[in-house]
Image (cartoon, rainbow, N blue to C red):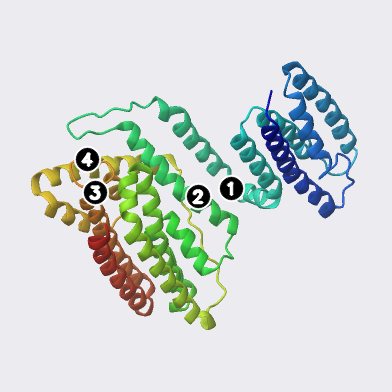
Amino acid sequence: MLEITQIAIQIGLTLALSILVGMEREQNIRLRAELPTLGGIRTFPLIGFLGYLLARSQWAFTGGILVLGALLAMQYRGKMKGERYGLTTEFSALVVYALGFFIFQGEYWLATTIAVITALLLQMKTPLESLALRISTSELITFSQFVMLSAVILPLVPNANYTVYQLNPFRTWLIVVAVSGVSYLSYILQQLRGEKQGFFLAGILGGIYSSTVTTVALSKQSRIAGLPSLTCAGAIIGATGMMYLRIIVLVWLFSPPLGIRLLRPFAIIALITLAISLGTLYTGRKHTVAAPFHKPSINPLQLLNAILFALVFIIITIVTRVVIQQFGEAGLFTLAGIMGPTDIDPFIMSMTQHAQISLYQSGLAIAVAVASNNIFKGGYAWYLAGEKVGKITLGTFALISLLTIILSIFLL
């Protein structure tokens, strides 16, 4: 027998989660001026309670599904006579019925997660439909291929070290999945936002995708569309501020101790950089013109891009090990500085795989690579956008790079 306290908790959670979904359905009825055929905020809690009560018996719960399914089928048949009909509400009712079962089994976290996700999916009808229209067939195929490679093939990849360089195929591809996944999150958000996003948001989302790519794209757009120098520079600086937070997350995923070491200096620099970005954009707000921000055209989940990243990562991992063995700490920091002109993600992620160097050395090498990359991004902005944007961007990045090195030396 369940204790009274546990029963009370389960009943309360069933009521709360059922109301959450039911409230969304009630709002949908009011906003669309539809007839409340199935019900909303009152009916869904009753369905949740039914699932909770019948969960005590496998046969009773199965019978409840059959009865509820029959009622929902009759409901749907009636809806088909109207102009608009769908199965969303009916499936939501089945989900709420199942929530009662999970709660009775003590799966509180699972039930809560499913309820929240269900409510969000129902509420995000318009944005999701808009996203579906923006995503091309080729992008959908690319995403499907990547999911297959990540969820189906990845578990089959050997998780062992090979060669004298200790290369691990599983961890290599897992790093590719993580980096590409973070970039894809930004890619999807930018598709959702459309072209009329603010320049600060453009910089933030661009920083999640790739601060170097965003710098080049904004600099080119500044020259072509005639964007004010402060507006363009502010967005570019914002992308770099977000880059620091992106690095913390990616490094922490594969080396939590190193990620924690980077947290203090990189979080401070990120806040400073984002504050400078906001200040720059605020200063130039009077001269800001309405201009669309061109979203990234390259899907980060393309298989060729993923394979190239994996190859570059393997090469950099091997080169880094050789440099450390032959030239020690000085060679490592020199190599980190040389990485500046290119995408520094492979080098940064390779630092999470070297056990023969200390966390301090790995963190400082990442800081050197980031500082070098900042200087080169300032140079790209100067060359592509002109002297006005270049002076602001390069000057800011020189200061940020200096702070990156100093704070990393003392706070790592």
For the residue carrying disc 3, how many other residues have a C-alpha within 10 Å: few (<14), some (14-19), or many (20+)? Answer: many
Q: Amino acid at mark 1?
A: Ile
The residue at 27%/49% (across/down) is 347
First of labels 2, 3 by sequence position: 2
Q: Which residue is mark 4?
A: 355
Cα separation, mark 2 vs mark 3, equals 29 Å
Q: Quadrant of residue 85?
A: top right
Marks 3 and 4: in contact by CB < 8 Å? no
Q: Amino acid at mark 2?
A: Leu
Residue 135 circle label: 1
Query: Element under label 4?
Result: loop
Distance from Cα at disc 2 to Cα at disc 4: 30 Å
Residue furthest to the front in view is 4
User: Does dot 2 land on a helix, a strand or a loop?
Assistant: helix
Q: Quadrant of residue 21?
A: top right
| Residue 16: % across, % down | 72, 43
Question: Which type of secondary structure does the marked residue at label 1 adopt?
Answer: loop
Mark 3 or 1, which is nearer the eye? 3
Q: Nearer the N terminus, badge 1 or badge 4?
A: 1
CA gap between label 3 and label 1 equals 41 Å
Query: To which residue does mark 2 refer?
Result: 185
Seen in the picture, residue 308 relative to 334 is either above or below; the reply is above
Disc 2 crowd rating (10 Å Cα; few below 14, some 14-19, many 20+) is some
Q: Circle 1: is it few (<14), some (14-19), or many (20+) Cα within 10 Å?
A: few
Question: Outermost residue toward the bottom?
Answer: 286
| Quarter holding residue 73 | top right
Q: Which residue lies under the disc numbered 3?
A: 359
Image quadrant where one finds the C terminus: bottom left
Contact? badges 3 and 1 (CB < 8 Å): no
Disc 1 versus disc 4: nearer the observer: 4
Residue 83 place in picture, x, y as percent: 87, 44
